[in-house]
Image (tube, grey):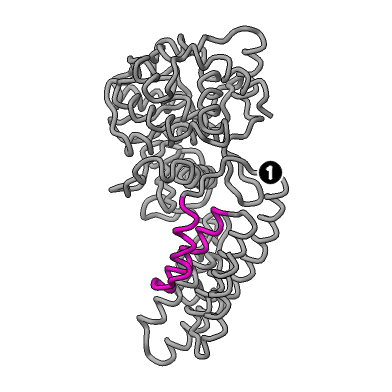
Amino acid sequence: MYRIGTVFLLLACGAAAATPESALAEDHAKLAAEAEKAGLREEASLEARAALRLAPDHAAVKALLEKLGPVRVIEWPDALHARFVGWSKKRAGIRMAGAKKLATAATAAEKAGNADEAKRLRELAIAEDPDCAEARKAMGMEKVDVAGWVTKEEAAQRRKGLLPVGAEWLPAKDAAARHGKWAEAWEVRSAHFLVRTNTSEKEGLAMAVRAEELLVALRRELDGLTDPLPPPAAPYEIHFYAARADLDAHIDTVHAGKAFLKSMGGFYSPQDKTSHFCPPAERSISTLDDLVRHEATHHLLSDLWPNAAMHFKPGFWAWEGIACYFETIEVRDGKILTGRASHARLVMAKDDMQKGKFKTLEELAAADQNGLGSVYEQSAALAHFFMHSEGGKKREKFVEYLKIVSKGDGDAGNWEKCFGKKPADMQAEWLAYLKGLK
């Protein structure tokens, strides 16, 4: 660690004529080294990658990335979080300052007649700090409530109290009425998702944020255990219906009116490659955030592991269990974490265990979709066991089992092949884990 950090400092000090890019690359490199020293492995990896975007041949950064390897987060104690908060404040300051320097360099390039270079530098500035006003304004953008940075023309319309409906700009009340009909639903885009909703633009944006958080968590927690998620040919699509009746109408039109879909608060369909949901019922255990993360997990993993006919085969608990596991996401001071023991499903699982309502592992492993309805909480808890117990030692085997289940082959023989034990022989260990989960 000392040697890598020393290399960073020597490089920084030796750059007599450093450009804004090279200087910022060194800032990222130093932040990466500090994060690695503080035990913030994910942050070290992210900063190292940021440095390489600016300085692709940075040997010391490449060495650090190789040293870090996968950056899955199995535990996140309070002391580590405190170090994260302090380091994050420093990172924010460096990124803001770096973005400003890039934006200033862009202005100089523009004055020198190099429009392409100015555009490139401004794009780098926005990558460093998405809220860099100097770069955004120079690119003809203004910031407005809800929508954020938009073109000057759009900002002018929104400041008049008008909202878009297709190519039209209408008073907010009229626009809301039009968007309330599914045919003219809001369309909100984020980096990887397209959210269609007849609720509001604000709710669509919030849903896109939840989905992006899920994507970050899923990529990180499966890093090195399976192939990377393939780039989607089009944005992952989410439909959020304002009312149950709206979702049911879609099911009637597109999904042959299937009754079992109408009993669900949300579902992912490979037929239209879309996650669908409406506001959860009043007494539902699932929050809207849970539904987004659950169905988006099914969507992402279906892209990663194309599956067929698994719903009515043994082992289906694992497919639902991993989606329930990613419901446990929490965001603490900007840090995306998984495995929150206070999540309602895990609390209910512990309660059911204490009341003797559990299926045995042998029964759960053999259950298909029809036998799973009442034990989603148990599936969530079992997925947590495989993802976190013994410092995550069982995680790799669990992911291998998930791949097998996705192909419809999750029978008892493959359980034993993956985990080295029969379900009955793991019963006591997993119950003890759940009992001690805090």
- Relative depth, front residue between 345 and 393: 393
Q: Which residue is mark 1?
A: 77
Q: Is residue 290 magenta?
A: no
Work out whether residue 174 can be spotted: no
Residue 325, x across and y down, in percent: 52, 31
Which amino acid, by three-letter code, is at mark 1?
Pro
Work out whether residue 141 can be spotted: yes
- Magenta stretch mostly in which secondary structure? helix
Image quadrant of residue 437? top right
Residue 267, x across and y down, in percent: 41, 27
User: Image point 43% across, 10% down: which residue?
Assistant: 371
Q: Quadrant of the N terminus?
A: bottom right
User: Image point 58% across, 21% down: which residue?
Assistant: 284
Q: Which residues are magenta?
A: 41-69
Left or right: 327 with respect to 397? right
**Circle 1 Cα neighbour tier, 10 Å, few/some/many (<14 / 14–19 / ≥20):** few
- Which type of secondary structure does the marked residue at label 1 adopt? loop
User: Image point 43% across, 35% down: which residue?
Assistant: 396
Q: Is residue 48 magenta?
A: yes
- Relative depth, front residue between 285 and 181: 285
